[in-house]
Image (cartoon, helix red, strand yellow):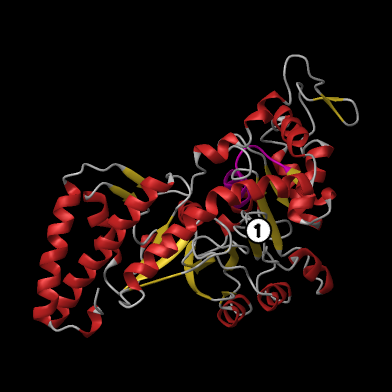
Amino acid sequence: MPNFLKLNKDELLKIKSDLKQQYENIKKLGLNLDMSRGKPSPEQLDLSTSMLDAVNSSSNYFSKGNIDCRNYGVLDGIDEMKELMSQIMEVDKNNIIIGGNSSLSLMFDTISHFMTHGTSKDPAWIKQKDIKFLCPCPGYDRHFSITEYFGIKMIPIKMNSDGPDMDEIQKLVENDSTIKGIWCVPKYSNPQGITYSDEVVTRFAKLKPAANDFRIFWDNAYAVHGLTNHEEKLLNIFEKCEKYNSCNLPIMFCSTSKITFAGAGISAIACQGENLENLKKRFSFKIIGYDKLNQLRHYRFLKNINILKYHMKKHAQILNPKFSLVINKFNDNFSNNPILSWTNPKGGYFISVETINGCAKETVRYCKEAGLKLTSAGSTYPYGIDPNDSNIRIAPSYPDIKELGMAMDVFCLCVKLAAAEKLIKDKT
């Protein structure tokens, strides 16, 4: 395929005609392909099926300390699960609260608590005027949905190859007391797959916010989700914050949703000092204790970080070929036709692509009409507004290899069709 950017209008019109015919032929196939979310595949879920037998009718239902996991109590989680999560999150187990099946729910609850009661010594956020949150972009749409739900103004922050733009963040955070937080996916970020550099993590720890109640929402969702044998290392923000006397800044979230069962995993929150005590107290009004049988089940199945990492290698063996297929399709279709650029992540669940400006929505629309459902264009930005209309999140995990190959053929065709039309329009 020639470089579209070097073609004249007549050449583009001819290519568009050919692409349109291919597109109409694909539509006749009646495809029904879904790549809209980063869901584990059935093969990945099968890796954890034996966990269902870890607590059964003949099992011992008691955890350490002779705690009956069938009964009420233990708000912050059984000791065994806190120890396992401490190994995943690389924080002291005494700084961890074990939650239910969703880290997103813990994030929502934390924002809700701060909105109604404040962080500790500062007023409730809802009583403060025009509060704001920083949102590295492209980013995770569900983060943005939470802040939008609570009416918090979102400020987009540029993502660089090593993490969010810290010059911009420092300038804003240290000069504006209405800025109360920032969303971060620091390892294998959603959707670009970026792991924050040591410098970025260190600069987060060294921030001197104008607002005493500014918090870093550190969503370490992909802490153990590498795709290769060479795991990328993320600097420990808790250790850095201890060094720079900023322990109240980070609140970390994590879950086993893409380790075991996406709908029946274990979530956790980690923080220090007044954050920990306040959240424990406030959660106590909501719940007496989360599902301890599920915690016990997970502990008996995963046991320790070494067994867990071996388990995650099995996930990588399923996922890596899918990510490689997508990257190979992009190379085959666009290596000499720079109408699409893409990331090549070493972990996580997504690949971020950039069309030429003004083509993302049209590409997604074409895909939908051809039977391929993608995440909505613009969803990786606050309020669903991508200023360049160029970013699309690709989620390769759920389809099998055959379906994924078909999906990427459809996607690549739609990228070309949308780009050809845009370039023709620009030349008119």
Q: Position of residue 183 (x, y in %)?
A: 57, 62
Q: Quadrant of residue 353?
A: bottom left
Q: Which residues are magenta?
A: 98-112
Amino acid type of the residue tagged 1 in the rendering: Pro
Mark 1 surroundings: few (<14), some (14-19) or many (≥20) residues within 10 A: some
58 up-or-down from 410: above or below: above
Q: Residue, x 49% and y 61% (percent of image)?
A: 191
Residue 125 horizontal side relative to residue 324, left or right: right
Q: Residue, x 36% and y 52% (percent of image)?
A: 405
28 up-or-down from 7: above or below: above
Q: Quadrant of residue 23?
A: bottom left
Residue 271 lies in the magenta-colored region: no
Work out which residue is located at the far right of the displayed protein and give it.
65
Q: Residue, x 62% and y 60% (percent of image)?
A: 228
Residue placed most toward the observer, 252 or 194: 194
23 up-or-down from 32: above or below: below
Residue 299 horizontal side relative to residue 365, left or right: right
Q: Position of residue 96 (x, y in %)?
A: 77, 48
Work out which residue is located at the far top of the displayed protein and give it.
57
Q: Position of residue 338 (x, y in %)?
A: 33, 77
Residue placed most toward the observer, 50 or 197: 50
Q: Which residue is mark 1?
A: 123
Q: In this view of the protein, can residue 293 be seen by the observer?
A: yes
Q: Residue, x 63% and y 50% (percent of image)?
A: 110
Q: Position of residue 240 (x, y in %)?
A: 78, 70
Residue 109 horizontal side relative to residue 275, left or right: left
Q: Quadrant of residue 169?
A: bottom right
Q: Secondary structure at mark 1?
A: loop
- For the N terminus, the quadrant is bottom left
- For the C terminus, the quadrant is bottom left
Q: In this view of the protein, can residue 150 be seen by the observer?
A: no
Q: Could you tell me what secondary structure mostly forms the magenta stretch? A: helix
